[in-house]
Amino acid sequence: MPDQPVIEVKGLAAGYDRKPILRDVSFTVRRGEIFVVLGGSGCGKSTLLKHIIGLHPLLGGEVRIMGNRMEGGDANERDRAVRSFGVTYQSGALFGSMTLLENICLPLEVFTDLPPDARRLVAKMKLELVGLKPFANYFPADVSGGMKKRAAIARAIALNPSVLFLDEPSAGLDPVTSAGLDRLILRLRDTHGITFVIVTHELNSIFTIADRCIMLDTQAQGVIAEGPPTLLRDTSEVPAVRAFFNPALAHSGA
């Protein structure tokens, strides 16, 4: 069902050393949606992502992915949740001593019983999907920043996840490369039905790819706006939201 929630976050509290950075965060992400988490520096965007995917324990609340609890259930339920998503990080986090092909083969080696030839075939298919098949035997140091991001996406989809979490995918990229990455994200959603949750502050990307977004705020320690980005830009009366989506107005003091 198109509107079926694939991610449900209810009353989430997140932070470190029992000190909350976010409180009472609730939202759902629907199947096939590109959902963007945005906000200023230090507002908790990456903290939210890390807690949703289970890198840090929740201070409160609940996260369900594909109906399975990340915390509070049994080990099998958490395993089903974890197996349903892939993640890419801002740096790409590729292993420098491995070729791009070997990087994509790694999750297949760890989590499947496929023989080596089958793993390589699947990895080549994923590289072709992101436009990198000719670079299969290159090392990460030998390719551009944009190609590293694409390779990281290829590795993240190696196990055919339903959901992809992307942390600042356009960070450090020039506008042309960033636009190409946006087109790839849209194509993966449209042709493979992947649901995306993306942390970013790049306005061009947000308006190009986001179906809905939430905006986090440091002082509020939570969500101060939710909706399609154009609607928030054009109708929000919250000063922080207006300033984020209309930086020219904010700089002019309007």
Image (spheres, rainbow, N blue to C red):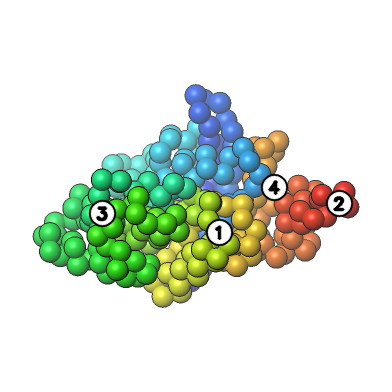
The mark found on residue 224 in the picture is 4
Q: Earlier in the sequence, mark 1 or mark 3?
A: 3
Q: Position of residue 11 (x, y in %)?
A: 56, 42
Q: In terms of sequence position, does the residue under pointer 4 or pointer 1 come before the other?
A: 1
Residue at 11% across, 60% down = 115
User: Can you identify the residue that label 2 sits on?
Assistant: 252
Mark 2 or 3 closer to N-term?
A: 3
Q: Amino acid at mark 1?
A: Asp
Which disc, if any, is residue 9?
none
**Of the pair 205 and 57, the residue shown nearer to us:** 205
Q: Are marks 1 and 2 in contact (CB under 8 Å)?
A: no
**Does residue 39 appear left or right of residue 112 in this picture?**
right
In space, the residues marked 2 and 4 are separated at their CA atoms by 23 Å
Q: CA distance from mark 4 to mark 3?
A: 43 Å
Q: Secondary structure at mark 3?
A: loop
* Residue farthest toward the bottom in the current orientation of the protein: 191
What amino acid is labelled 4 in the image? Answer: Ile
| Quadrant housing residue 187 | bottom left
- Please tell me whether mark 2 sits on a helix, a strand or a loop: helix
Q: Amino acid at mark 2?
A: Ser
Q: Nearer the viewer, mark 4 or mark 1?
A: 1
- The numbered mark at residue 99 is 3
The type of residue carrying mark 3 is Thr
Near-viewer residue (44 or 130)? 130
Q: Label 3 near label 1: C-beta < 8 Å?
A: no
> Can you tell which mark lies on residue 174?
1
Query: Dot 1: what SS?
Result: loop
| Label 1 vs label 2, nearer the camera | 1
